[in-house]
Image (spheres, rainbow, N blue to C red):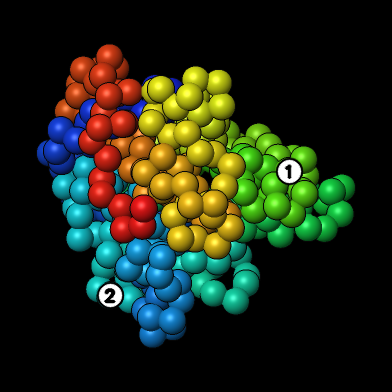
């Protein structure tokens, strides 16, 4: 079975997030990925030297990141703690799906599964990566972008094979937000090729989901691209009335490249990474994407009040 959450509907899950944790249908949670999910592995490994303020406590944002909200929402908040700090979050900032100078997605999963005969079949396994692969691809020959997307999504399939081989059953994957809509791409003048790279990757994610289903996995899918685009369009055409975000083009607060706009109304913290408010929305959408019965009920209740929730009940950020 596959569970999808897309576009504006994704933000409706904010109601579920603020209503408090759902009763845990999952026995635990494990996270694998890159800087979107890293809660302190890079920071711990480098002795606190990276990332530093205004980044928040080792996150690549100005506040908590989406996996922390997801973990809280399914009743396993401690699971989102970095693995180097004793938690179940194996994500590393800068990770590719394979290779690279920090533990890749496949290396993360290998380090987790190799010592174990089996893994917890009732836990949720979050496998979200590929952004750095496609940022690499846009820097080369555009003709090779398709091959890079295929390689990255094939690595995601390998990740699912590794987890399924040890008994995992419940998986959450996600697509990529438009890399061409980031302040980084705008500053570098590579918006077009960045969007091309994003679209090439996202077009193959349906195949990843289908592959996981073929392995007998319960696949959930978070449409990160749809949510990010909806927030951007709301800011540009509707003054941020629905999501409470008005700045979608520059870094925020004290981050490099910022014009001083508050992070509380910004989509991005730095030139690439989502702000704390964006992560809050992402976490809520991810909660809605996994099969939590209570969450679906709360999500329906929230459809009419999501705009108010987005504007009035933000998680306090570390950088204004």
Label 2: which secondary element: helix
As drawn, the label of residue 42 is: none
Q: Which x, y percent locates residue 50?
A: 46, 76
Residue visible at 27% across and 40% down in the picture: 314
User: Which quadrant of the figure has residue 233?
Assistant: top right
From this view, report whether residue 38 is shown above or below residue 262: below
Task: Give the left or right position of residue 258, taking residue 90 as reference.
Answer: right
Of 270 and 128, which appears nearest the observer? 270
Task: Give the left or right position of residue 1, taking residue 196 as reference.
Answer: left
Of 62 and 163, which appears nearest the observer? 62
Q: Residue furthest front?
A: 260
Of 23 and 61, which appears nearest the observer? 61
Which residue is under mark 1?
Answer: 191
Q: Residue furthest top?
A: 304
Of 220 and 121, which appears nearest the observer? 220
Q: Which x, y percent locates residue 227?
A: 47, 32
- Residue 296 seen in the current view: no
Residue visible at 26% across and 45% down in the picture: 315
Crowd band around label 1 with a 10 angstrom C-alpha radius: few (<14), some (14–19), many (20+) = many
Which residue is under mark 2?
Answer: 85
Residue visible at 41% across and 65% down in the picture: 54
Earlier residue among tags 2 and 1:
2
Crowd band around label 2 with a 10 angstrom C-alpha radius: few (<14), some (14–19), many (20+) = few
* Marks 2 and 1, how far apart at CA: 37 Å
Residue visible at 25% across and 32% down in the picture: 312
Q: Which x, y percent locates residue 286?
A: 36, 38
């Amino acid at each position: 079975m596959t569970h999808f959450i897309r576009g504006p509907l994704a933000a409706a899950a904010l109601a579920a997030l603020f209503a408090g944790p759902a009763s845990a249908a999952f026995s635990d949670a494990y996270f694998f990925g890159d800087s979107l999910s890293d809660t302190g592995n890079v920071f711990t490994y480098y002795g606190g030297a990276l990332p530093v303020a205004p980044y928040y406590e080792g996150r690549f944002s100005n506040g908590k990141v989406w996996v922390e909200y997801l973990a809280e929402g399914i009743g396993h908040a401690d699971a989102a703690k970095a693995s180097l700090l004793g938690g179940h979050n194996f994500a590393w900032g800068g990770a590719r799906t394979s290779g690279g100078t920090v533990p890749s997605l496949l290396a993360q999963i290998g380090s987790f599964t190799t010592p174990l005969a089996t893994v917890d079949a009732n836990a949720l396994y979050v496998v979200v990566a590929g952004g750095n692969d496609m940022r690499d691809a846009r820097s080369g020959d555009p003709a090779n972008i398709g091959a890079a997307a295929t390689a990255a999504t094939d690595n995601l399939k390998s990740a699912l094979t590794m987890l399924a081989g040890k008994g995992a059953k419940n998986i959450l994957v996600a697509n990529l937000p438009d890399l061409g809509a980031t302040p980084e791409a705008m500053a570098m003048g590579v918006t077009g090729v960045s969007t091309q790279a994003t679209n090439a990757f996202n077009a193959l994610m349906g195949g990843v989901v289908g592959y996981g289903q073929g392995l007998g996995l319960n696949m959930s899918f978070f449409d990160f691209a749809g949510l990010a685009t909806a927030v951007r369009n709301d800011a540009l055409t509707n003054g941020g009335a629905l999501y409470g975000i008005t700045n979608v083009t520059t870094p925020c607060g004290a981050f490099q490249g910022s014009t001083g706009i508050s992070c509380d109304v910004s989509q991005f913290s730095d030139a690439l990474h989502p702000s704390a408010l964006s992560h809050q929305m992402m976490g809520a959408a991810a909660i809605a994407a996994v099969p939590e019965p209570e969450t679906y009920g709360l999500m329906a209740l929230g459809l009419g009040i999501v705009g108010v929730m987005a504007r009035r009940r933000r998680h306090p950020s570390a950088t204004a």
